Image (cartoon, rainbow, N blue to C red):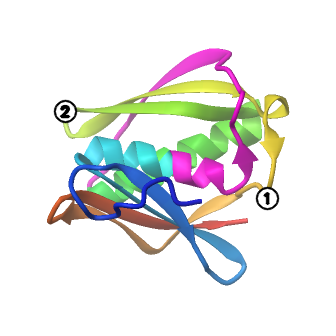
Amino acid sequence: MDRSPARGGGTAAGHRAVPHTADMRIEAWGASREECLAEAVLGMVDCFADLSGARPDAVRQVRLTGHSDDELLAALLDEVLFRLEVHGEVPLDVEAESVNGGLDVRLSVTGLHSVQITGAVPKAVSWNELHLAPAPSGWTCAATVDV
């Protein structure tokens, strides 16, 4: 799914899945690092679930740390996969805020049973070709997720 036709243009945020052998490859972009990270989560979820009509059941707050932006991206996606596998929770909305070199993340979640499954549920985040970096018009990131 491509959530924004203006990739890289202006301050529009969005995400899309790109073809990748046997895995999911997600690209996301936003005006800020935090917006880009939130779009990455929504991009990963869009690859396997239809969230239309779903309503949040709970809000989860998490603090994530990492030595680099790439590590923060991996930590956030890993947190989402952990909540999916262990708690059966799917994020419908994501807000991230920079705090002391890390991130405070707010996930509005619903039960996996409340959404329509449309693809293979992801299992792990690959460190191969993982990146989160500033771009001319904001921030971009990309990650490969094993399914």
Q: Distance between the Cα atoms at labels 1 and 2?
A: 37 Å
Does 45 lie within the magenta span?
A: yes
Determine whether, in the image, residue 33 is placed left or right of residue 36: left
Q: Nearer the viewer, residue 6 or 33?
A: 6
Residue at x 17% of width, y 59% of height = 137
Q: Nearer the viewer, mark 1 or mark 2?
A: 1
Report helix, strand or loop for mark 2: loop
Q: Nearer the viewer, residue 138 or 132?
A: 138
Residue at x 69% of width, y 35% of height = 52
Question: Vertically, is 40 above or below 143?
Answer: above
Tell me the kind of residue under disc 1.
Gly
Question: Vertically, is 24 above or below 104?
Answer: below
Disc 2 designates what residue? 100
The segment highlighted magenta reads: 42-67
Residue most extreme to the bottom: 21
Report helix, strand or loop for mark 1: loop
- Residue 63 % position (x, y): 39, 30
- Residue 97 % position (x, y): 28, 31
Tell me the kind of residue under disc 2.
Asn
Please state the total of marks drawn on the protein image.
2
- Residue 59 % position (x, y): 55, 17
Disc 1 designates what residue? 119
| Picture quarter with the N terminus | bottom right
Residue most extreme to the front: 5
Question: Vertically, is 119 above or below 19?
Answer: above
Residue count near mark 2 (Cα–Cα under 10 Å), binned few <14, some 14–19, many ≥20: few
Determine whether, in the image, residue 101 is placed left or right of residue 15: left
